[in-house]
Amino acid sequence: MEIVADTGTGPITDVDVRRLYAWPEAAVTGAATWVRCNMVMSLDGVIAGPDGQSASIATPIDKQVFLALRRDCDVILVGAGTARTEGYRPAAAPIALVTRTLDLHLDMPLFAQATDATPRTLVITTDEAAAAAPAWLLDAADLLPCGASEVDLPRALAELRRRGMARVHCEGGPALMTSLIADHVLDELLLTVTPVLIGAGPRLVHELIGAADAAFTQVLTEDGTLLLRVAFAPAVGS
Ligand SMILES: NC(=O)c1ccc[n+]([C@@H]2O[C@H](COP(=O)([O-])OP(=O)(O)OC[C@H]3O[C@@H](n4cnc5c(N)ncnc54)[C@H](OP(=O)(O)O)[C@@H]3O)[C@@H](O)[C@H]2O)c1
């Protein structure tokens, strides 16, 4: 356990973030997938402000760590709801979007702002949805059909690793994180708790999924914000 009190020595750098949030060696070499989810919540457990955006509950240090973490991964995994609400754009790492409905549009910034220099977006969906995918989407993204009528996340993760993406950095949202926990494929939650009270609003996970066996492995405070690493126990038999 690493506990770092707020020393007031200045912002956490990218180098600090790489050290404090180091990936397991097996994920670095590609021998095994490691899935981490980075989320921010208010002191009372709400994950979006009244405007529906997570940015409105974030603090400068959370934003800084969020940006540094997504620069240090093989793929950014995100639910379609978050991509739609938060206006996802292409990033340094490829974005893998999870969607059951394939309710996507060419004018979404993720597709509209893509260039030859940006990594190609991956769309993880069902076989049924992929069979009816529009031509523009086949042009704009690589489709990964994984499961007949439901997305099989373990299969999707295996496919990502086959493509050299073992360091999977998930940015939520709650529905996707709930599925990852239910499927026992979430290894770690990187949770920022910010000192704001929101009241009503969406929570970290969508529905009761039973007790998840987890442990805090790192606790940092920086600039009045709490930055936690929480490890989930591997599934029995895995
Ligand atoms: N505080 C934070 O750190 C944080 C992070 C992310 C998001 N958020 C907030 O969370 C809210 C969005 O919540 P959300 O639960 O809708 O987000 P979400 O999990 O990103 O999106 C849900 C959608 O993603 C797809 N999806 C998720 N899991 C799936 C699965 N297992 N199989 C197939 N498709 C799956 C589905 O897309 P289709 O509808 O296309 O089938 C589903 O409707 C927003 O207010 C956002 O700002 C907060």
Image (cartoon, rainbow, N blue to C red):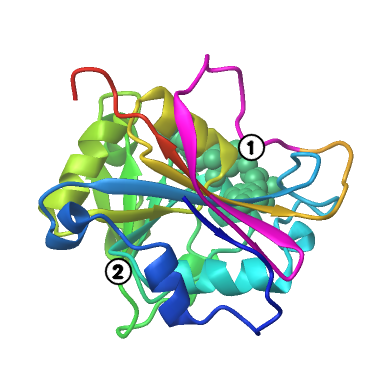
For residue 140, which quarter of the picture?
Answer: bottom left
Nearer to me, 167 or 95: 167
Badge 2 or badge 1: first in the primary sequence? 2
- 43 is higher (above) or lower (below) than 195: above
User: Does residue 189 appear to the left or right of 236 in the view shown?
Assistant: right
Residue occupying the point 19% across, 18% down: 237
* Residue where numbered disc 2 is placed: 120
Q: Dot 1 lies on which element?
A: loop
Numbered badge on residue 188:
none
User: Does residue 158 appear to the left or right of 211 in the view shown?
Assistant: left
- 86 is higher (above) or lower (below) than 161: below
Tell me whether the residue at label 2 lies in contact with that at label 1, contact meaning CB atoms closer than 8 angstroms. Answer: no
Q: Ligand 1, what quadrant?
A: top right
- 9 is higher (above) or lower (below) than 99: below
Residue occupying the point 87% across, 46% down: 198
Q: Quadrant of the C terminus?
A: top left
The location of residue 138, given as percent across then percent down, is 28, 57
Say which amino acid is labelled 1.
Leu
Is 214 colored magenta in this rendering?
A: yes
Mark 1, ligand 1, within 8 Å: the answer is: yes
Residues under labels 2 and 1: Cα distance?
A: 29 Å
* Residue where numbered disc 1 is placed: 204
Extent of the magenta region = 202-228
The location of residue 72, given as percent across then percent down, is 36, 70
User: Does residue 69 appear to the left or right of 88 in the view shown?
Assistant: left
